[in-house]
Amino acid sequence: MGYTIREMHADEYRLLEDFLYEAIFIPEGAEPPARDIIKLPDLQVYIKDFGTLPCDTAYAAFVDGRAVGAAWARIMHDYGHIDDETPSLAVALYKEYRGQGIGTGLMSALLSGLWDKGCRRTSLSVQKANYAVKMYRKLGFVTVDENDEEYIMLKDL
């Protein structure tokens, strides 16, 4: 499948709402939460006023002109927060586009974009049962903290 990845334009940041919902890990057999879960303050930190902070960086993947995935980062007090110098990231793809290398491509573009903005490391939070843990490790993320359900991972850029 052919796809392209590029930095998102400011008028496309509204798409991050959809991808924020897609980024929510739903374990096998669990009921997906209602879409309005993204309105919770703990999740709004990922997208509210995106583009207004120095390290706000977002990339999208497109297939036939349609956005099918996004990876974005910003300095925020989220689940993966390390410090006020390290942007945390999120990545999501629509289900039918997962497992095809697009997520890795998005992550690579995002990591490069963060470097270009002067960021020297990035972090994330991921549930231990999430299949994406393997991708993060392949990209060089290391676990720096964990609890019963999640890893906090960090990557030097």
Image (spheres, rainbow, N blue to C red):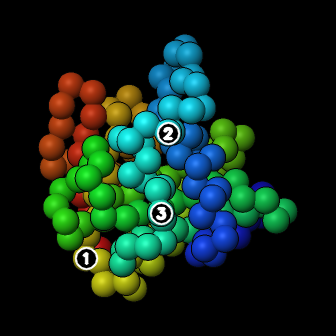
Q: In the rendered image, which residue does mark 1 sit on?
A: 120
Q: Earlier in the sequence, mark 1 or mark 3?
A: 3
Residues at discs 2 and 3 in contact (Cβ within 8 Å): no
- Compare marks 2 and 3 and give the one earlier in the sequence: 2
**Mark carried by residue 39:** 2
**As rendered, which of 76 and 27 lies closer to the eye?**
76
Which residue position holds label 3? Answer: 49
Amino acid on which the number 1 mark rests in the picture: Arg
Residue visible at 37% across and 83% down? 117
Looking at the rendered image, the disc whose residue lies closer to the viewer, 1 or 3, is 3
Task: Locate the C terminus and report the quarter of the image it occupies.
Answer: bottom left
Give the position of the N terminus as an image quadrant: bottom right
Residue 26: percent from the left, percent from the top?
Answer: 50, 27
Above/below status of 94 relative to 76 = above
Q: Is residue 97 visible?
A: yes
Q: Considering the numbered disc 3 on the image, is that residue within a helix, a strand or a loop?
A: loop
Q: Residue at x 56, y 68 (%)?
A: 59
Disc 3 residue type (three-letter): Asp
Percent across and percent down for residue 94 are 66, 44
Instruction: Specify whether residue 153 is in view.
Output: no
Residue positioned 48% across, 65% down in the render? 50
Amino acid, disc 2? Lys
